[in-house]
């Protein structure tokens, strides 16, 4: 792989894909939060219906899918190359890192991938009609899937909620390093702006994690 | 002061190595770390044993020859110094000190604590120079250079190529070294002329030699004896991106 793409090229693509996936998280979160702001779940179902039927979104979901694939494959290649670069490790290794979670990107990444796979089966494949059945509702006189009911049913199960919260915490760790790292890899480092980027990265990771966490907690405790 | 030493011993590049325990006694706290190893070696030679091989040269922190991974850190427990500038007062009486060689695939062990760092020379040979005609030595102010850039170039040029960045990096990445060398030229008018070719060639050589990828952990900056900043890595990424796109 190094023969075709340099280490810097791979890191640049990794950064672009990471930032792209972060924008997806923001969109995903804003739709999910509709379940908190509108407990009748009408707004959420309308948004889900739009996301599931709009032609542009249908096309763009393949771009998103490609983003995930590139990010995951590059992450694995980079990690394997990094392991190969030090065949024999140290007996004693002191910690001298600035970005703590950078040490665990592969570990948090693998956990997020497992979470994503479960998420994909539980929601995406159900929404696409491959498995299970979803209750129907009427939106503007047309029959649509009651995605809100599907989400609420899953968030009634305590073990599912706990698993979801743990996965989100891991996602937060991944984002905490990923945000500022993406800017550094793209060469966007400046004495004036980098402290803000680093600070905002921590804030973004906490915000995304807590906001996503609020949804299952709200649904579980308001049943 | 008395110390217990755990030292990596490896007779040759392809032989198996292992940690061997030694004891040194009545070491002055004002002795340097390398002087302590000299004392150990003198004792080993007097006993007819093979002395511990370790790299050293100027012993004043400017040549980049000394190395050693001491108690889990390159160049030992102090920041911003090389092993030759480390003194025994930084250790406690009776302490166990673990000494290992730099560990990275492109830095194979030659013997004991000595590693072959010629991979860095190969990276420099790939593009870490100016080959355009720059004429004779000009007057000091003949070429206007922004003070900030001159300072940044000088900071980058402070890299002594010791390899502590590679040793400290969890991925054995050489990005800080290469970035410092790319930056010291890219920031100055004479170096800018070949900047695009230079960054691409040096990165390609770094990858070919088998160094790891940078994951922006910044352990390199924390352990660099010359405090080379990771902003140089961002500059190199920027130079690389611009070179690829233009």
Image (spheres, coloured by chain):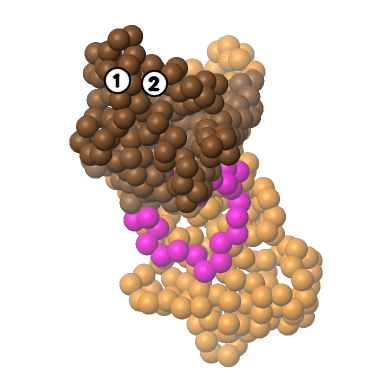
Chain colours: A brown, B orange
- The residue depicted at 58 percent of the width and 90 percent of the height is B47
- Start and end of the magenta stretch? A83-105
| Above or below, A191 relative to B174 | above
Side (left or right) of A29 relative to A4:
right
Outermost residue toward the top in this view: A140
Decide whether residue B218 is among the magenta residues.
no
Real-space Cα separation, disc 1 to disc 2, in angstroms: 8 Å
Side (left or right) of A112 relative to A69:
right
Find residue B22 and report its horizontal and vertical position in percent.
61, 82
Question: Magenta stretch mostly in which secondary structure?
Answer: loop
Question: Who is closer to the viewer here, B72 or A21?
Answer: A21
Q: For the residue carrying disc 2, how many other residues have a C-alpha within 10 Å: few (<14), some (14-19), or many (20+)? A: many
Find residue A14 and report its horizontal and vertical position in percent.
37, 33
Mark 1 vs 2, N-terminal side: 2
User: Are circles 1 and 2 on residues that touch, CB within 8 Å?
Assistant: yes
Residue A45 is marked as: 2
Q: For the residue carrying disc 1, how many other residues have a C-alpha within 10 Å: few (<14), some (14-19), or many (20+)? A: some
Q: Which residue position holds label 1?
A: A144
């Amino acid at each position: 792989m190094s023969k075709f793409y340099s280490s810097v090229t791979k890191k640049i693509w990794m950064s672009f894909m990471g930032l792209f996936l972060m924008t997806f998280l923001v969109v995903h979160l804003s739709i999910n939060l509709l379940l908190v702001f509108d407990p009748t779940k009408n707004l959420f179902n309308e948004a889900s219906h739009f996301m599931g039927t709009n032609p542009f979104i249908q096309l763009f979901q393949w771009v998103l899918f490609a983003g995930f694939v590139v990010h995951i494959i590059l992450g694995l290649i980079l990690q394997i190359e990094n392991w190969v670069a030090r065949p024999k490790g140290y007996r004693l290794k002191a910690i001298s890192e600035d970005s703590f979670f950078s040490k665990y990107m592969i570990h948090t990444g693998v956990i997020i991938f497992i979470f994503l796979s479960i998420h994909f089966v539980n929601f995406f494949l159900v929404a696409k009609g491959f498995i299970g059945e979803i209750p129907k509702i009427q939106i503007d006189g047309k029959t649509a899937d009651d995605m809100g009911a599907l989400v609420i049913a899953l968030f009634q199960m305590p073990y599912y909620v706990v698993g979801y919260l743990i996965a989100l915490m891991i996602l937060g760790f991944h984002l905490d390093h990923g945000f500022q790292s993406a800017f550094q890899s793209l060469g966007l480092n400046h004495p004036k702006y980098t402290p803000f980027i680093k600070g905002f990265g921590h804030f973004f990771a906490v915000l995304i994690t807590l906001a996503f966490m609020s949804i299952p907690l709200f649904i579980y405790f308001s049943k | 002061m008395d110390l217990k030493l755990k030292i990596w011993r490896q007779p040759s590049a392809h032989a198996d190595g292992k940690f061997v325990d030694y004891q040194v006694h009545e070491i002055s706290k004002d002795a340097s770390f390398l002087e302590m190893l000299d004392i150990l070696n003198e004792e080993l030679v007097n006993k007819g044993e093979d002395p511990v091989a370790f790299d050293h040269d100027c012993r004043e922190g400017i040549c980049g020859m000394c190395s050693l991974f001491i108690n889990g850190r390159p160049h030992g427990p102090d920041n911003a110094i090389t092993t030759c500038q480390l003194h025994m007062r930084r250790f406690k009486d009776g302490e166990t000190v673990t000494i290992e060689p730099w560990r990275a695939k492109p830095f194979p062990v030659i013997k004991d604590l000595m590693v072959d760092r010629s991979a860095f020379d190969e990276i420099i040979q790939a593009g870490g120079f100016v080959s355009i005609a720059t004429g004779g030595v000009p007057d000091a102010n003949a070429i206007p250079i922004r003070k900030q850039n001159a300072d940044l170039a000088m900071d980058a040029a402070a890299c002594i190529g010791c390899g502590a960045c590679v040793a400290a990096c969890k991925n054995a990445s050489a990005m800080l070294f290469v970035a410092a060398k790319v930056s010291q030229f890219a920031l100055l008018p004479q170096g800018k002329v070949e900047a695009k070719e230079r960054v691409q060639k040096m990165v390609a050589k770094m990858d070919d030699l088998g160094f790891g990828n940078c994951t922006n952990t910044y352990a390199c900056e924390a352990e660099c004896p010359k405090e080379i900043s990771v902003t140089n890595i961002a500059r190199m990424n920027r130079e690389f991106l611009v070179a690829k796109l233009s």
